[in-house]
Amino acid sequence: MEKLAELVRTQLRIQEATYSDRIPEEAAPLCISVLKATPDTLASPRQPHRVTGSTMLVSRAGHPLVGTATLELADTPLHEQICEFASVALAAGCKEVQLLPIFLLPGVHVREDIPTEVALAQKSLGEAITIHQRPHLGAHPSLGTMLASQLAAVDTEAKIMLAHGTRRAGGNEPVEAVAKQLGAVAAYWSVKPTLEEQIVTLANAGHQQIAIVPYFLFCGGITDAIAKRCREAQIAKSITSLQARFPKLELSLANPIGVSPQLANLIVELTEDKPNPRDVDQLG
């Protein structure tokens, strides 16, 4: 997360240098807080196997103030971490803090857990500084374009975009939309259609080379499990029946989204009033 935080700082500095003559002086002490929380696994010294829900915090007051916090498995609740950062931001002259959830889907964390923590933080801070929750990362209209650019070198007959999935009505529609942009079909880790089901469907349609594209931000428990499942399929262990039915089937695993200047730029844009969709070559 610190690497992503530093990339956000860099993007803000570039933006300030480019548009400094257009930014009103009273708008300079803006504090942006970027909330990171994913269902995937992140590593830390204290929790080497599972840490979910980090937070990134940014300020535009001449020297971007960027910090991180955690929604789950932290020593202190998120609202206390927000208050701590807000106090630093207030001392730097900021009057507003914006939290941007780095979630790909608007699930329970985005719709319920984070707003609750924000409300608790705001109650504690009073009127000294205002906390705003911004749209989650997956809401950026250019995310699919960025992913398509990352996958340009993946040359296979078919692609399966694998997401965590949700049982909430309509909750998987954003996944389907991004998969369509990538020329892929969607599969889910926790709901149907599953990865195996989609592999069978594509194999029955005559596809012999299939790339599995994890719709997760970072490598972790789920993506590691996918890789293990792919390796086992290729050597006819876990998915022996598939390999027997489709002996020429080749499965490959693409990388998750990962940290990049392009991703950092999407985060910065989501802290603005109107995200600016643009060609991915212009991002970062």
Image (cartoon, rainbow, N blue to C red):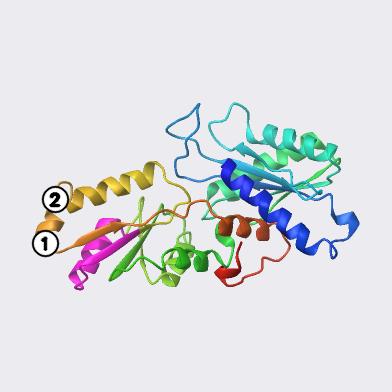
Image quarter (top left, top right, bottom left or bottom right) of the C terminus: bottom right
Mark 1 belongs to which amino acid?
Pro
Q: Are marks 2 and 1 in contact (CB under 8 Å)?
A: no
Badge count:
2
In the image, what residue occupies the spot 23% across and 49% down?
231
Mark 2 belongs to which amino acid?
Ala
Q: Which residues are magenta?
A: 193-212
The location of residue 77, given as percent across then percent down, is 63, 31
Identify residue for label 1: 247
Q: Is residue 120 magenta?
A: no
Specify whether residue 124 is in view: yes
The location of residue 201, given as percent across then percent down, is 23, 67
- Looking at the rendered structure, which numbered label has been put on residue 170? none
In the image, what residue occupies the spot 54% across and 35% down?
72
In the image, what residue occupies the spot 79% across and 40% down?
89
Specify whether residue 35 is in view: no
Farthest residue to the left: give it: 244
- For label 2, the SS is loop
In the image, what residue occupies the spot 36% across and 68% down?
184
Return the residue nearer the eye: 91 or 3: 3
Which badge, 2 or 1, is on the more N-terminal residue? 2
Q: Is residue 204 magenta?
A: yes
- Looking at the rendered structure, which numbered label has been put on residue 236? 2
Q: Is residue 126 left or right of residue 39?
A: right
